[in-house]
Image (cartoon, rainbow, N blue to C red):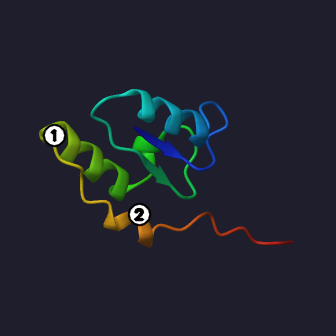
Amino acid sequence: VVTGDYDPITPPAWAQLAAETLRNSFYFEYPGVGHSAFYGGECAENMIFSFVNDPTRAPDSSCISRMTGPDFELP
């Protein structure tokens, strides 16, 4: 189960709940990403492809720690 921490449609708390109800699941939350976590960048894409190729193993999630949120500038 993947989610973005800015997802207003299916917030991370709901994604966590869904993951808890699945017997064999993995949960990943991407910082600075909205509803379409798959489009959150190379990290999310690689992890999702890795899962599809082998759903029995958790994908390497080390790239999440290098993700940052949006860089907002004040006027």
Q: Secondary structure under badge 1?
A: loop
Q: Residue at x 34, y 57 (%)?
A: 42
Q: Position of residue 74 (x, y in %)?
A: 83, 72
Q: Residues within 10 Å of mark 1 (few under 14, many from 20)?
A: few
User: How far apart are labels 1 and 2 at the CA level?
Assistant: 20 Å
Please give the residue where the numbered disc 1 appears in the rendered image. 56
Q: Residue furthest right?
A: 75
Give, as a three-letter code, the residue at label 2: Ile
Rendered residue at 17%/47% (across/down): 57
Residue 13 is drawn in which quadrant? top right
Q: Is residue 10 left or right of residue 45?
A: right
Kindly identify the amino acid type of the residue bearing the numbered disc 1: Thr
Crowding at dot 2, Cα within 10 Å, few <14 / some 14-19 / many 20+, comes out as some
Q: Specify the label residue 64 is tagged with.
A: 2
Q: Position of residue 62 (x, y in %)?
A: 32, 67
**25 left or right of 70?**
left
**Nearer to us in this view, 61 or 18:** 18
Q: Is residue 14 above or below residue 4?
A: above
Q: Nearer the viewer, mark 1 or mark 2?
A: 1
The C terminus - image quarter:
bottom right
